[in-house]
Amino acid sequence: MIKNPDKPLTIGRIAARADVGIDTIRFYERRGLLPEPSRTESGYRLYPPATITRLNFIRRAKALGFSLDEIVTLLALQDTGGPKAEVKAITHRKLEQVEAKIADLERMRDVLRELDRDCTGTGDIDGCPIIEALSDATHENDAGPLADEIDANKEAAS
């Protein structure tokens, strides 16, 4: 049981309660994700308990793929009561990035499936369709038809 829920906490206690490392907290301070804490006369950092909530916000945002710069912006909007439209715009851009990444991964999966299907997995490596496809340097950029296919798909998605 917490005796005084408003009592400032040391970096070690904040780290333990938020399940992050002390170095992570210091890094987040330097990056502007956490406000600079107050300090004791002997120089120890003291954080308000709300820092735990902020660290949880950062962890969830990172898990969703937001960059630290995007998280700084989201936190600044939260701190200042910024417009919801800006939060939505940041989230929408992230969604578009994730959807593009998923599309790229699906294309890669399709190529890998085709390579897997074409290879019997038996015999010597000579004539292996996977090695041949990866080694095919007859196409522009010397990466072969696989890279051409992925590049063409990326251009089509743009």
Image: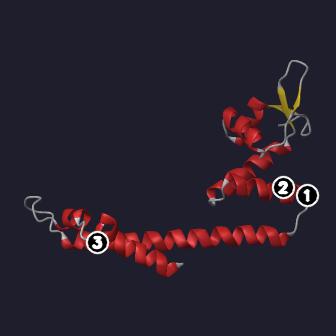
* Residue holding disc 1: 80
Counting from the top left corner in percent of width and height, residue 19 is at 67, 40
Q: Label 2 amino acid?
A: Ala
Q: Are marks 1 and 2 in contact (CB under 8 Å)?
A: yes
Q: Which residue is mark 2?
A: 76
Q: Position of residue 29 (x, y in %)?
A: 77, 39
**Contact flag, marks 1 and 3 (Cβ < 8 Å):** no
Mark 3 or mark 2, which is nearer the start of the sequence?
Answer: 2
First-in-chain label (1 vs 3): 1
Q: Quadrant of residue 153?
A: bottom left
Tell me the element at label 2.
helix
Give me the residue at 76% from left, 71% from top.
88
Give coordinates of residue 149: x percent, y percent: 36, 75
Which amino acid type is shown beneath numbered disc 3?
His
Q: Quadrant of residue 16?
A: top right
Left or right placement of residue 37 versus residue 57 in this view: right
Describe the element under mark 3 as helix, strand or loop: loop
User: Could you tell me the amino acid type at mark 1?
Assistant: Thr
Element carrying mark 1: helix
Name the residue at 47% across, 75% down.
154
Q: The N terminus lies in which quarter of the figure?
A: top right
